[in-house]
Amino acid sequence: MIYSKIIKLTMTDIAANLKLVRDKISNACNRRSAELGNNIPRLVAVSKTKPPNLIIDAYENGQQHFGENYVNELVDKANHPDIKIKDIKWHFIGHLQRNKVNKVLAVPNLYMVETVDTEKLASTVDSAWQKYKKQDDSQLKIMVQVNTSGEKEKSGCEISQTSTLVNYIKNNCKNLKFVGLMTIGAYGYDPANGPNPDFVALKNCRDDICKELNLSKDDVELSMGMSTDYEHAVGGNKSKFMYKLIIESVICQ
């Protein structure tokens, strides 16, 4: 496995990066309107291309949730002897092919798959989880990925199909627990132009499916925001549309 030159970072650097990100999230939360409450977003540290020692350093500085985009990299890291014994919670956040489902579900400490975008994939994950769950009633947390930007090269179901897919999962995939919606917005949006349209679209999509399927908004998290826009996702620029968020942010930079 070849990792980036991030390898030069020390534990002190990691601690400083984490504090900076957490402080920015806290400040962004303080700028939100009172109606949104004080829910602190979950920080998922995207660790793709980062070596195991940096993940361990981040974990030892209080970071528990990590996201990986690539199947083989997730498998290698999750089974690393120094990482495997840690109470790390892995999120798979990359495009998932049906023939790679078993490799992902076999990962130690797999916490969530955020990129389910078709009924076929949901059904495959549901069937496979029976082999890997540790308890008879254990459900795998999953999110539905929504292509809010409409870009052809992006994965994710269409906004108009989201309710149908969520309904299918809830009624036909008994081994899965639907917990929210995820999007990767269009790259390079300038927050100075106002609320990010992808974030607004995901929030509206959440509101619509909650109304259609009689779901509580408290039970449908939103996963959005990368290292370049997470402050805006949390609630900067007087945004009034964020309720629960998972911030996907690279901290090892």
Image (cartoon, rainbow, N blue to C red):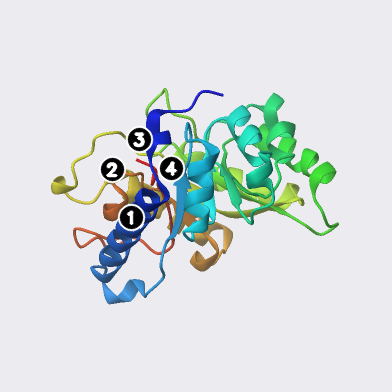
How many C-alpha atoms fall within 10 Å of the one at disc 1: few (<14), some, or many (≥20)?
some
Name the residue located 17 percent from the left edge and 50 percent from the top edge: 194
Q: Nearer the viewer, residue 18 or 140?
A: 18
Marks 1,4: beta carbons within 8 A = no
User: Label 1, label 4: how many angstroms apart (C-alpha)?
Assistant: 28 Å
Q: Nearer the viewer, mark 1 or mark 3?
A: 1
Measuring from the top left, give residue 169's x and y in whole percent: 67, 47
Name the residue located 27 percent from the left edge and 68 percent from the top edge: 32
First in residue order: circle 2 vs circle 3: 3
- The secondary element bearing badge 3 is classed as loop
Q: Which of marks 2 and 3 is in front?
A: 2
Question: Measured along the vertical axis of the image, is residue 1 above or below residue 103?
Answer: above
Residue type at mark 3?
A: Ser
Residue position marked by numbered label 3 in the rendering = 149
Residue position marked by numbered label 1 in the rendering = 16
Q: Which of marks 1 and 4 is in front?
A: 1
- The secondary element bearing badge 2 is classed as loop
Residue position marked by numbered label 4 in the rendering = 183
First in residue order: circle 1 vs circle 2: 1
User: Label 2, label 4: how many angstroms apart (C-alpha)?
Assistant: 14 Å
Measuring from the top left, give residue 79's x and y in whole percent: 69, 39
How many C-alpha atoms fall within 10 Å of the one at disc 2: few (<14), some, or many (≥20)?
some
Residue position marked by numbered label 2 in the rendering = 228
Residue type at mark 1?
A: Ala
